[in-house]
Image: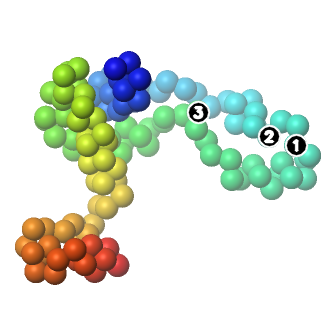
């Protein structure tokens, strides 16, 4: 049980408002260049633009979370006996970020008319 709880614990930050507004990590030049230590200067200059900035939650995350308009039931599902729905809720949040265009959604009517092939027709 402990492994399952730790696996999905990262999604709880969406349900605690104080964690959304605070910045946990602050970027520093030392943290940003640490993966490039020991690499030749010529190669380091080429790799630096492709290095992801992962030390900062920043304002973008809280702005994206506010944009999602998370439903009221999300805070109810934070309780331990509802945590089995964590993967489903995470998938719903990702779907809202990845597929903001409503024409990509497949309704029951679309599925009944075209069958399983509607997935390919609607997504392209």
Residue drawn at x 24%, y 28% as measured from the top left = 83
Rendered location of residue 14, percent (x, y) = 31, 32
Q: Residues within 10 Å of mark 1 (few under 14, many from 20)?
A: few
Q: Residues within 10 Å of mark 3 (few under 14, many from 20)?
A: some
Specify whether 19 is left or right of 33: left
Look at the image and tell me in which quarter the C terminus lies: bottom left
Q: Nearer the viewer, residue 100 or 88?
A: 88
Identify the residue at the far front of this view. 1
The image quarter containing residue 116 is: bottom left
C-alpha gap between disc 3 and disc 1:
21 Å
Per the model, the C-alpha gap separating discs 2 and 3 is: 15 Å
**Location of residue 39 (image quadrant):** top right
**Upstream in the sequence, badge 2 or badge 3?**
2
Instruction: Kindly indicate whether the residue at mark 3 contacts the one at mark 2 (C-beta within 8 angstroms).
Output: no
Residue position marked by numbered label 2 in the rendering: 36
Q: Secondary structure at mark 1?
A: loop
Residue 119's x, y, as percent? 27, 73
* Neighbourhood count class around disc 2 (C-alpha, 10 Å): few under 14, some 14–19, many 20 upward: some
Give the residue at x 75% y 37%.
35
Taking 40 as reference, is 25 above or below it? above
Task: Between residue 74 and residue 111, name the one nearer to us.
Answer: 111
Q: Could you say where residue 122 lies in the image, as x and y percent from the top left?
A: 26, 76
Residue placed under numbered mark 1 in the picture:
39
Image marks 3 and 1: residues in contact by CB distance under 8 Å: no
- N-term-proximal mark, 3 vs 1: 1
In the image, residue 41 above or below residue 119: above
In the rendered image, which quarter contains the N terminus? top left
* Apparent side of residue 57 relative to residue 93 in the rendered image (left or right): right
- Kindly identify which residue carries mark 3: 55
Instruction: Classify mark 3: helix, strand or loop.
Output: loop
């Amino acid at each position: 049980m402990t492994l399952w709880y730790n696996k999905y614990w990262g999604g709880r930050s969406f349900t605690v408002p104080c964690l959304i507004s605070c910045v946990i990590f602050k970027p520093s030049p030392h943290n940003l260049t640490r993966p490039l230590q020991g690499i030749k200067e010529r190669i380091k200059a080429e790799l630096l633009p492709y290095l992801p900035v992962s030390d900062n939650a920043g304002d973008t995350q809280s702005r994206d979370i506010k944009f999602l308009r998370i439903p009221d039931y999300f805070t109810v599902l934070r309780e331990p006996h509802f945590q089995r729905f964590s993967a489903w809720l995470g998938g719903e949040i990702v779907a809202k970020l990845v597929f903001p265009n409503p024409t990509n959604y497949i309704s029951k009517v679309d599925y009944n008319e075209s069958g399983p092939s509607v997935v390919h027709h609607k997504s392209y």
